[in-house]
Amino acid sequence: MLIRERMTKDPVCIEPSVSVLDALAILKKHNIRRLPVCERGRLVGLVTQMDLLKASPSEATSLSVWELNYLISKTTVSDIMARRPVTVTPDMPVEEAAMIMRDKRIGGLPVVEGEKLVGIITETDIFDAFVDLVGVRRGGVRVTLLLEDRVGSLAEITQIAEEHAVNILSVSTLPPVDGLGESVWRLSGDRMEEFIQALKDRGIKVLHVA
């Protein structure tokens, strides 16, 4: 699954000269939390809701209302934006975007081709992709197995599933520890109990069935 399949195409973006108050209004209007900053389609920065809120004067300020209005009107996105935001390309795998977000502790990434902004991918997009990958919305039975880290261990399960007319909706595995790893299968079929028993009869450890 590539980023281009999950990103928001042609995202809302603003110019560097937009005021902080106007940028906050745009966020509220579109119910979003970050805005790419562009000049003639070229990405030059990124500003988040938190950046904008921090730039807004505190209620505890001693400034007069006139001074506040003047200060706010003079503060633009260019004054507070991140000028070299972390970006990704449309043909990168979604999981790479997830890893970058996790490592950098950020909630969204502009998607660029060259310097041109073509989309944005956020943590919500990543969550949606994960939900689809593991097949949660497809229902079925979730079976967690403890498998040996060896060639053919997954093929053995698929063979047993075929023998019992069990349909495999999704498969995911965790890194093995001491030669054993958890493998989560989402399955459907009318002979599920027979399938589970067949796994046990083959010496395969069934950790959980839901």
Image (spheres, rainbow, N blue to C red):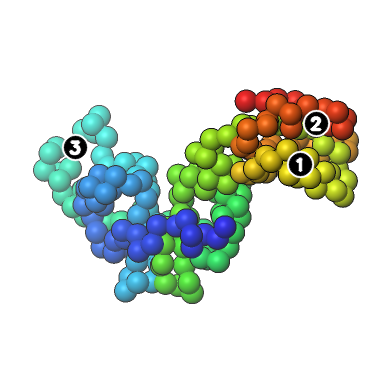
Q: Quadrant of residue 136?
A: top right
Marks 2 and 1, how far apart at CA: 10 Å
Label disc, if present, on residue 63 of the rendered structure = 3
Residue 87 visible, this orientation: no
Estimate the x, y position of residue 71 in percent, counting from the top left: 21, 48
- Residue in view at x 31 percent, y 58 percent: 12
Instruction: State which mark lies toward you, 3 or 2.
Output: 2
The image shows residue 116, relative to residue 137, as above or below, that is below
Q: Is residue 116 left or right of residue 103?
A: left
- Residue in view at x 65 percent, y 43 percent: 168
**First reached walking from the N terminus: tag 3 or tag 2:** 3
The image shows residue 113, relative to residue 128, as above or below, that is below
Relative to the observer, which residue lies in front, 51 or 38?
A: 38
Marks 1 and 3, how far apart at CA: 76 Å
- Residue in view at x 60 percent, y 52 percent: 95
- Amino acid type, callout 2: Ala
**First reached walking from the N terminus: tag 1 or tag 3:** 3
Label disc, if present, on residue 198 of the rendered structure = 2
Instruction: State which mark lies toward you, 1 or 3.
Output: 1
SS at mark 3 in the image: loop
Q: Which residue is denoted by mark 1 in the rendering?
A: 163
Q: Is residue 79 left or right of residue 86?
A: left
Relative to the observer, which residue lies in front, 39 or 166?
A: 166
Estimate the x, y position of residue 190 in percent, counting from the top left: 63, 32
Estimate the x, y position of residue 102 in percent, counting from the top left: 58, 45
